[in-house]
C-alpha cells in the first residue's frame, strides 16, 4: 500500500489510481526547427537519473484525471511534496536540473 | 445514428451549437447495458438478503465543464438546475436531479431519462462564457447498491476507504472498483450509487453479485426505488 496526495482531490489516494509520466518541468524548445539534432535529441530522449531529489509528472488517472507534479527521493521512494501544474516546488531542483 | 432527426436543432437560441434531441421516439426500444440481467421489478426483498443490487437504466447523464470561479457558469448552473456547484468530492441533489463533482472543472448531472434534451436546452440558455455541456447518457449507466452489508461489499471491491468517517453521505469519489473505474456516491448510510462505463456494466454487475453473495443478495430495485422511478420505455427482452 502506497498513498499519494492528489493536490486536486485534496486527499491521499491509493497508488493504483495514478500513473507516472516521467520527468517534470521539461521545456519544449520554442523553435524546434532551429534546434540542432543534439538539442532536440536531448529534449526528446535524454533524462537525468539522479540519486535523491527528483521532480516527476504524474496523473491521477483513475480519479480526477488531472496532471500534477511530485518531488520524490529516488533512493528512499519518499514523496516529499506534490503540487499542481503551474505551481513551483518548495524544494530546490538543484539535483535534477543538471541536463544539458 | 441513422434514425436521429435534427428537427430539434434550434440555431437561433444558441448560435453555433447544433442542439439535438437524442431521445428516440417510442418506436425505437431503448436498451440499457444491463438489459440482459435478471432483475425483479416488484420491490419485494427476501428476508435473508442483506444486499440489494439493481440498475437505474437510461437516465440522463450530462457532463458540465466550466470554471467554478466564473459567475456566468456558476450562476447559470444554479438557474438551470436549482443546484449549487458542489465542492471537490461533494454532490448536491434536489428532487430527481443530482450534481456530482468529478474533477476541478467538471461535474456530472444526472436526472430522469426523458429530460436530457430539456435540461441541455435550459443549460445552454442560462450558461455564459466558456463552458461545455455533453450528453454522455449513452456511454455510462448507474448501478445501485443498498442494504446493511452494502458497505462490506465495497470494502472488498475497492481500495478507497469507505468508512463512515472518511466517506460520509453526499461524498462522491471516482476510484478503482474491481479492475475498472467507477464513480461512487453515498446516498445514505446503506445506500450507494455507482456510475460505470457502459462497456463495463456487465463486469461490475457480476463482480458485485459475486462479492455480495456471502451476505445474501437481491437483484432488483427496492420498493422505495420502484415507487420513485420515472416511467420510461425499457426493453427488457433478452437478445
Ligand atoms: Zn485527484
Image (cartoon, rainbow, N blue to C red):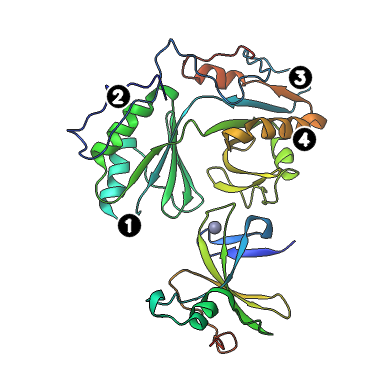
**Chain designation of label 1:** B
Task: Kindly indicate whether the residues beneath marks 2 and 3 are on one polypeptide chain.
Answer: yes
CA gap between label 4 and label 2 equals: 44 Å
Report whether the residue tagged 1 is closer than 8 Å to ligand 1: no
Q: Which mark is residue A14?
A: none
As drawn, the residue found furthest toward the right would be: B214
CA gap between label 4 and label 3 equals: 19 Å
On the image, the x and y values in percent for residue B34 come to 62, 24
Cβ atoms at labels 4 and 3 below 8 Å apart: no
On the image, the x and y values in percent for residue B210 come to 78, 32
Q: Which residue is mark 4?
A: B211
Q: Which residue is mark 2?
A: B6
Is residue B96 found left or right of B119 in the rendered image?
right
Q: Which mark is residue B69?
A: 1
- The answer to whether residue B97 is above or below residue B169 is above
Which mark is in front, 1 or 2?
Answer: 2
Q: Earlier in the sequence, mark 1 or mark 3?
A: 3
Q: Which mark is residue B47?
A: 3
Residue B57: name its quadrant.
top right
Task: Kindly indicate whether the residues beneath marks 4 and 3 are on one polypeptide chain.
Answer: yes
CA gap between label 4 and label 1 equals: 41 Å
Q: Earlier in the sequence, mark 2 or mark 3?
A: 2
Which mark is in front, 4 or 2?
Answer: 2
On the image, the x and y values in percent for residue B12 come to 17, 33
CA gap between label 1 and label 2 equals: 34 Å
Amino acid at each position: 500500500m502506497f498513498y499519494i496526495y492528489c493536490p486536486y482531490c485534496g486527499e491521499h489516494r491509493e497508488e493504483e489510481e495514478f500513473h507516472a509520466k516521467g520527468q517534470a518541468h521539461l521545456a519544449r524548445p520554442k523553435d524546434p526547427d532551429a534546434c540542432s539534432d543534439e538539442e532536440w535529441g536531448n529534449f526528446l530522449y535524454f533524462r537525468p537519473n539522479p540519486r535523491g531529489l527528483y521532480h516527476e509528472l504524474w496523473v491521477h488517472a483513475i480519479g480526477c484525471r488531472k496532471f500534477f507534479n511530485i518531488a520524490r527521493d529516488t533512493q528512499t521512494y519518499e514523496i516529499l511534496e506534490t503540487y499542481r501544474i503551474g505551481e513551483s516546488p518548495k524544494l530546490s531542483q538543484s539535483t535534477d536540473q543538471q541536463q544539458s | 445514428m441513422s434514425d436521429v432527426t435534427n428537427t430539434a436543432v434550434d440555431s437561433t437560441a444558441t448560435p453555433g451549437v447544433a442542439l439535438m434531441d437524442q431521445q428516440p421516439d417510442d418506436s425505437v426500444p431503448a436498451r440499457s447495458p444491463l438489459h440482459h440481467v435478471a432483475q425483479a421489478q416488484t420491490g419485494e426483498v427476501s428476508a435473508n438478503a442483506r444486499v440489494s443490487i439493481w440498475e437505474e437504466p437510461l437516465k440522463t447523464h450530462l457532463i458540465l465543464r466550466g470554471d467554478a470561479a466564473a459567475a456566468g457558469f456558476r450562476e447559470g448552473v444554479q438557474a438551470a438546475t436549482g443546484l449549487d456547484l458542489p465542492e471537490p468530492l461533494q454532490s448536491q441533489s434536489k428532487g430527481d436531479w443530482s450534481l456530482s463533482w468529478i474533477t476541478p472543472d467538471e461535474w456530472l448531472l444526472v436526472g430522469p431519462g426523458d429530460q436530457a434534451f430539456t435540461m441541455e436546452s435550459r443549460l445552454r440558455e442560462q450558461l455564459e462564457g466558456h463552458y461545455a455541456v455533453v450528453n454522455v447518457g449513452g456511454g455510462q449507466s448507474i448501478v445501485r447498491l443498498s442494504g446493511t452489508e452494502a458497505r462490506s461489499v465495497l470494502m472488498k471491491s475497492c481500495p478507497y476507504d469507505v468508512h463512515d468517517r472518511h466517506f460520509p453521505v453526499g461524498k462522491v469519489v471516482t476510484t478503482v472498483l474491481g479492475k475498472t473505474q467507477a464513480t461512487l456516491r453515498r446516498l445514505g448510510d446503506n445506500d450507494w450509487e455507482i456510475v460505470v462505463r457502459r462497456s463495463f456494466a456487465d463486469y461490475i454487475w457480476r463482480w458485485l453479485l459475486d462479492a455480495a453473495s456471502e451476505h445474501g443478495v437481491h437483484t432488483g430495485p427496492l420498493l422505495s426505488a420502484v415507487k420513485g422511478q420515472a416511467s420510461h420505455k425499457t426493453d427488457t427482452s433478452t437478445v
